Amino acid sequence: MSKIVSVDVKDIRFPTSLQSDGSDAMHTDPDYSCAYVSVKIASGLEGYGLTFTNGRGTEVVVQAAKSLSALVVGKSVDDIYKDFGNFWRSLTSESQMRWIGPEKGVIHLATAAIINALWDLWGKIEKKPVWRLLADLSPEALVSCIDFRYLSNVITKEEALQLLKQGEAGKQDRIKVLLDKGYPCYTTQAGWLGYSDAKIKKLANKYMDLGYTAFKVKVGKNLQDDIKRLELIRSVIGWDKILMVDANQVWEVQEAIDWMKQLAKFKPLWIEEPTSPDDVLGHAQIAKALKPLGIAVATGEMCCNRVLFKQFLQAEALEYCQIDSARIGGVNEILSVYLMAKKLGVKVCPHAGGVGLCEMVQHLQMWDFASLSATSEGKVIEFVDQQHEHFVDPCIIKNAHYLAPRAPGYSTTMKTEAIENYEYPNGKEWQLMFSKGIFQDPTKVQ
C-alpha cells in the first residue's frame, strides 16, 4: 500500500489587478490566486490540487489546508480510493474543525484543494486523465466516491446508480467524440468590467475570428454603461451569436428584475449571479419574473455546498447550474451536483477562468457528457484566457472547443518557475514589484 508521506501548501498569486483582468461589479481589483496543495506518497509520486482565491485572504485558506493535512498524512491511498466517499466525510466532518464550516467557507475551500490533489494523484497512479478515470469507473465505484448525506430527499444512491447505468449506453462513442472534437466553450475574456471600449471591441473581434459563438459580459455597476457595453458587443458579434451577462451578486432582488428588463432588448441567454449566492428564494423570484422575457438565471460558482445546490435545483431557482471546480468540496461533492441536475433536468454549464479552473473543469464536464448526461446540447464551458501558461499541461482550445486532456491527472501541475516567481510574498516577481513600489510588501507593513 502507498502511504501519504507529506502534504505541502503554497500561496500563489498573480497581479491581474494591474490590467483589470477578472474585474466585475463586485470584485473590482482581483489578483487571481490559489492555495496550491501537493500530496506526496512514499514512491515519490505527487498529486497537485488547488482552490481559487482572489488575492488577499489566500493565506487564510493556506493555513486551513495545513490544518486539514493532519487528517491526510499517513493514510493509504489504496484505502482512500476504495472508499472515497467516507474519506471525504472524514475531512468535512472532523468533530472540531467542522465547527468553522460546516462544509462552507475557508475550511471547505481548503478541503477542495486537498481533494483535487488526491484526484490528480489517482489519475497519475492509473496513468489516465481524470475525466477518463471517472468515465472508466464502474457506476458502483463512482457512487462510492460520493457522500449522499442530506441529499436523499432529492436523490438516493440507488437512483444515482440507475442514472449512471443508463449512461453506459453509447459511452464509448461519446468518448470518441471528445477525443476527436472536444467540448464547446464560450468566452468571458472580452467582457471584463474594467476594460475600455477599444479593448472590448478588439477582444470580441479576436474571439469571433477564433470561432466563438457565445460571449459573456460583466454588468451591474452602472445601467447606462451596461447598455453602451452591450450595444458595443452586439455591434461586433451580431444577433445570431449567444450573449450572456453576469452581475456577480451585486443587486437586490427587485433591482435585478428591473435592471434586466432594461437589458432584455439585447437578448441575453442568462443573467448570472443576479443577487446573493445564498438567496435561493430570491433567485427563484428573479427567474420567475424574467422567464417571460426569455432570460434564464444561472448561478453556482459561489454556491457553498451540495445542500445549497439541492435547494436551488428544487426551487427551480436556476436554469443553468454553474458548478465550480474548487468552490465546493472538490470532485466528490461536484459529482453529486451533476447527478441531482441530471435527475431534475437542469443543464450544467460550469464556471471557469481564474487560476486552474479551466484546467480542472474540463475534466468534469467531459465526464458528464461521456457517462451521465450523454449530450452537450445547450451546454458550454466557460473559457478565460489567463494563467494557462503556468501549468505543465494547460487546457487546449481549438475551434471554440476544449480538447480532451490526454496527460494523466487533473491538469493541475504548475511549472516550477511559476512557483518560484509567484509564490507570495517571496517569489521573484513579487519581490521585484515590491522593490518598485507597485505593491506594498506585507512583511514590512507596520
Image: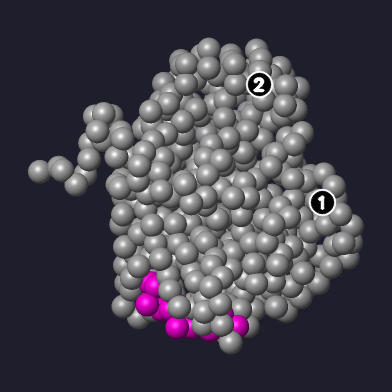
Please give the name of the residue rendered at 62% of the width and 46% of the height, measured from the top-left corner.
394
Q: Which quadrant of the rendered structure holds the N terminus?
A: bottom right
Q: CA distance from mark 2 to mark 1?
A: 26 Å
Please give the name of the residue rendered at 41% of the width and 21% of the height, measured from the top-left corner.
222
Q: Residues within 10 Å of mark 1 (few under 14, many from 20)?
A: some
Q: Which is more toward the observer, 128 or 302?
A: 128
Q: Residue tagged by mark 2?
A: 206
287, above or below 204, in the image: below
Q: Amino acid at mark 1?
A: Leu
Badge 2 marks a residue whose secondary structure is: helix
Percent from the top left, x then y, of residue 83? 60, 82
Please give the name of the residue rendered at 75% of the width and 28% of the height, measured from the top-left corner.
211
Q: Which quadrant of the rendered structure holds the C terminus?
A: top left
Q: Amino acid at mark 2?
A: Lys
Q: Is residue 214 visible?
A: yes
Percent from the top left, x then y, of residue 52? 46, 50
Residue 402 lies in what quarter of the image?
top right
Query: Going by the image, does 104 lie left or right of 371?
Result: left
In the rendered image, residue 213 lying in the magenta stretch gets the answer: no
Q: Which is more toward the observer, 4 or 403?
A: 4
Bounds of the magenta segment: 68-78
Q: Residue tagged by mark 1?
A: 179
Q: Which is more toward the observer, 11 or 241?
A: 11
Q: Is residue 283 visible?
A: no
